[in-house]
């Protein structure tokens, strides 16, 4: 078994005349935290959208555990164990925190509509399991006290944690986090870094991260891909990337 969980080759995405992503290649290993950084407009989100099944790439191959997933719709990609959060938190804001986690498990419930209507024992069991999983994740993320609150009324940092819980409850193999530190205060950022470490260590999940907060990126990533104008500048360890003159120029050139 190869140690690459996700393998992206020759990924290119055009929007009309604009080459937003130009021949990007990278691999995410099992239980690795891999970050994509780069100035605004570099093409990071477009890479995410291609990998997550939101865009069909113009060319390129995306393999998850050796299986081709490029061009699959996002729900099929999720079935392969790849789930994501969004730059702007996307929760069911009028549902409670607990309900958000129950809905997330719905596609995984082993029972159907009829069993649900008649509340047969197998349905009740799977409902109880879903409830138990939800409570476990609320505890893990320290947001159990908000279980019955409408998700939209939570503080922003808690909404972000709920979004991560909603992904993790589906037992992904690869968790894609799109700017998870955006809008968080310094303490929440430190908590997020610890959380990502724990998710990887305790649940063996690999993480693919887009992030502008360099403290978080450098603190949490095993390897980093740097993009500029749709192209890859370099891929390397945090210390290598930090001191790479091409990377420094890409960022300073932005000012
Ligand atoms: N759906 C789209 N249609 C047309 N152009 C797009 C579309 N999505 C992105 N682009 C363009 O592609 C380029 C790359 O954008 P992208 O959002 O991927 O960059 P990014 O690195 O994620 O930027 P940021 O850090 O600001 O989120 C930009 O020039 C952007 O305007």
Image (tube, grey):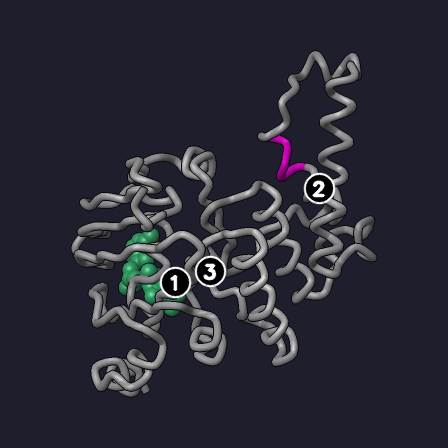
Q: Earlier in the sequence, mark 1 or mark 3?
A: 1
Q: Alpha-carbon distance for marks 2 and 3?
A: 24 Å
Is 204 magenta? The answer is no
Nearest the eye: 89 or 36: 36
**Does any portion of residue 18 appear in the rendered image?**
no
Is 106 magenta? The answer is yes
Which quadrant holds the C terminus?
A: bottom left
In the rendered view, tell whether residue 134 sits above or below residue 201: above
Q: Residue at x 16, y 55 (%)?
A: 17
Nearest the eye: 16 or 201: 201
Q: Which residue is mark 1?
A: 34
Magenta-drawn segment: 103-107
- Disc 1 to disc 2: CB gap under 8 Å: no
Task: Give percent across and percent down for residue 95.
Answer: 73, 44
Q: Main structural element of the magenta stretch: helix, strand or loop?
A: helix
- Disc 2 to disc 3: CB gap under 8 Å: no
Q: Residue at x 61, y 53 (%)?
A: 163
Which of the numbered marks, if any, corresponds to residue 178? 3
- 219 horizontally vs 145: left or right: left
Q: Nearer the viewer, mark 2 or mark 3?
A: 2
Q: Which residue is mark 2?
A: 133
Q: Residues within 10 Å of mark 1 (few under 14, many from 20)?
A: many
Task: Give percent across and percent down for residue 114.
Answer: 70, 12
Nearest the eye: 2 or 125: 2
Q: Residues within 10 Å of mark 2 (few under 14, many from 20)?
A: some
Q: Residue at x 61, y 80 (%)?
A: 186
Which quadrant holds the N terminus?
A: top left
Q: Residue at x 48, y 50 (%)?
A: 84
Ligand 1 position by quadrant? bottom left
């Amino acid at each position: 078994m190869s140690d690459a969980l996700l393998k992206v080759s020759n990924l290119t995405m055009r929007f009309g005349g604009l080459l937003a992503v130009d021949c990007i290649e990278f691999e995410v290993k099992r239980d690795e935290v891999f970050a994509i950084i780069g100035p605004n407009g570099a093409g990071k989100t477009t890479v995410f959208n291609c990998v997550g099944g939101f865009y069909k790439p113009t060319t390129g191959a995306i393999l998850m555990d050796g299986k081709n997933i490029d061009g699959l719709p996002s729900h099929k990609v999720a079935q392969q164990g790849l789930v994501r959060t969004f730059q702007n938190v996307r929760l069911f804001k009028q549902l409670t925190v607990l309900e958000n986690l129950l809905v997330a498990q719905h596609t995984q419930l082993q029972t159907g509509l009829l069993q649900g209507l008649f509340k047969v024992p197998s349905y009740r069991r799977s409902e109880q399991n879903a409830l138990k999983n939800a409570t476990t994740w609320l505890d893990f993320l320290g947001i159990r006290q908000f279980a019955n609150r409408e998700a939209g009324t939570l503080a922003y940092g808690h909404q972000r944690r709920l979004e991560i819980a909603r992904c993790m409850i589906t037992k992904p193999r690869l968790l894609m986090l799109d700017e998870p530190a955006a809008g968080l205060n310094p303490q929440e950022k430190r908590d997020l870094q610890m959380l990502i470490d724990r998710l990887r260590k305790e649940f063996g999940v690999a993480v693919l991260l887009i992030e502008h907060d360099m403290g978080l990126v450098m603190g949490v990533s095993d390897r980093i891909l740097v993009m500029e104008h749709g192209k890859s500048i370099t891929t390397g360890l945090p210390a290598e990337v930090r001191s790479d003159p091409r990377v420094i120029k890409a960022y300073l050139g932005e000012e």
